[in-house]
Amino acid sequence: MKQSKKIAVLGAGSWGTALAMVLADNGHEVRLWGHNPNHIKEINETGINQKYLPDIALPKGIVGYSDLIAAMENVSTIILAVPTKAIREVLKKVQAIIADEVTIVHVSKGIEPDTHLRISEMILDEMPKSLLKDVVVLSGPSHAEEVSLRHPTTVTVSSENMDAAIEIQDLFMNHHFRVYTNPDIIGVEIGGALKNIIALAAGITDGLGYGDNAKAALITRGLAEIARLGTKMGANPLTFSGLTGIGDLIVTCTSVHSRNWRAGNMLGKGYKLDDVLSSMGMVVEGVRTTKAAYQLAKKFEVNMPITEALYHVLVNGENPKDAVDQLMARGKTNEMDDLVNILDERIFEE
């Protein structure tokens, strides 16, 4: 029997709520914090997060909080489940409240534009060292809708301190939520973030009616782009063949649960980006991440044609069909060049 702990989950959206359910199933006392008092009141009164996980009954171990001070009382582990753009704002509030060091587990998937920081780096940049025990990332192929139904799911946790990763593995692990560890925090974060770009592109090709051949090509060549950039940034290329690489790509590029795929699908059908984003009701992380990855590709001189094409669609308003046609008209290359270059760089570094 696992020892019960007090855990704060910051972010009462679908993913934060689903992970709160896993923790509550494991016997922990979970404080689910959200910024909207009416939303939290409804969760506490009905036992359901109707806005984000309709008709799913929450375990008794979850209590909603709109008061961050109360939610943080006597908590040593924080699950950070807010969108990338809100992370700094939330952490500023957290550090003004806590007096003792905490472990922060971030579960979002993105890269900050302009700074090009991964989320773990944003946390280290924002939190005083005296208040931060460890930073852990939890990532992998996982839709909140399926986790909340307790369908079998596998994810990965990573940290610079693998003892901390193992502690979080133990916190979440149960018979329907399997957790692996991986020491490659760069690869885990890059894979989780960049797969949203490819999911947007896959949605566009589906919206254009191009079918499975096009989507298979996007997933495969998208993985090559992710591995190229990730390896340049210090990741282990083998990570991208695992859960946070190809696993996350498959689930995000092929499922109607994926908000990035849905957004891309609407773009492919001719909707304008502003209309797509306003209709989603949830943050589409791939839009911001595309901008960051485009900048990183230039910085590291990495060839990322899918990312570049999507950037021109999102930022410059290029017609999605024209962007896909230009991708197909690129000069011929050898498919194995990417793999050979990545392996050569890895061997040279070692």
Image: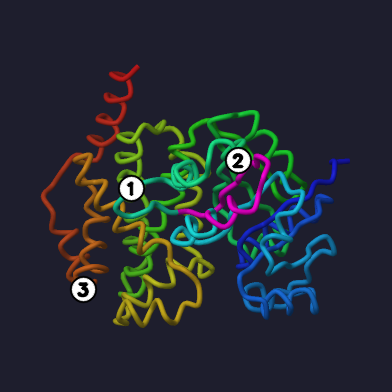
| Furthest residue toward left | 331
How far apart marks 3 and 1 lie (CA) works out to 23 Å
Which mark, by number, is residue 43?
none
Q: Can you identify the residue that label 2 sits on? A: 131
Is 94 in front, or is 339?
94
Q: Which residues are magenta?
A: 92-109
Q: Quadrant where the C terminus lies?
A: top left
User: Which numbered tag is attached to residue 317?
Assistant: 3
* Number of marks in the rendered image: 3
Looking at the image, which is closer to me, 272 or 92? 92
Mark closer to the chain start, 3 or 2: 2
Q: Is residue 29 left or right of residue 329?
A: right
Q: Amino acid at mark 1?
A: His
Q: Residues within 10 Å of mark 2 (few under 14, many from 20)?
A: some
In front of the other: label 3 or label 2?
A: 2
Image location of residue 130, percent across then percent down: 58, 36
